[in-house]
Amino acid sequence: MKPKQDSSDTADEITEWLVRNGRKALNLEAAKLLAADSPQQWYVASHGKKGYLIGKMTLQKFSQRHILVDEAGQPVLFASVEDALVFLRSELKVPNPHIFNF
């Protein structure tokens, strides 16, 4: 019988998807592909006073790889929740994103 592998040693599903698809980060091109494969569990969240970011939830852990980044690896920020929602719906075809406001 194999010992149960500790979940902290395994990659989360988004990181695994990125690796399978030859990606290192969730840039716009990768986000479009991932959203086409899995349009659920995308979200908009505040990034302090800087603006709002877009990400995809995972059940295992949070990673920088779960948020949309530009080509320099920096978070893509939007001026408002509405701007981020429009982007998710029009560019990524995510019909019902979650909004986290804390």
Image: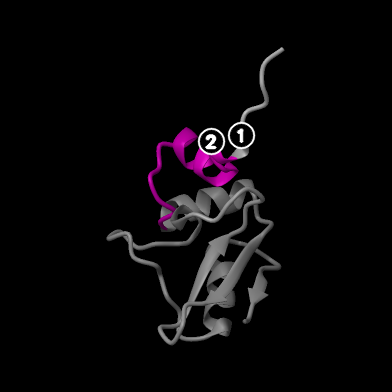
Q: Position of residue 73 (x, y in %)?
A: 32, 59
Q: Which residue is mark 1?
A: 6
Q: Residue at x 69, y 66 (%)?
A: 95
User: In the image, which residues are magenta?
Assistant: 8-27
Instruction: Count residues near mark 2 (Cα–Cα under 10 Å), then give few for <14, some for 14-19, many for 20+.
Output: few
What colour scheme governs how the chains and residues are painted in the rendered image of this protein? one colour
Q: Look at label 2 and name its amino acid.
A: Asp
Q: Is residue 22 magenta?
A: yes
Label pair 2/1, CB-CB below 8 angstroms: yes
Q: Secondary structure at mark 1?
A: loop
Viewer-proximal residue, 26 or 11?
A: 11
Instruction: Count residues near mark 1 (Cα–Cα under 10 Å), then give few for <14, some for 14-19, many for 20+.
Output: few
Q: Secondary structure at mark 2?
A: helix
Q: Residue at x 44, y 57 (%)?
A: 64
Q: Residue at x 65, y 75 (%)?
A: 99
Q: Which residue is mark 2?
A: 9
- Vertical comparison of 57 with 34: above or below: below
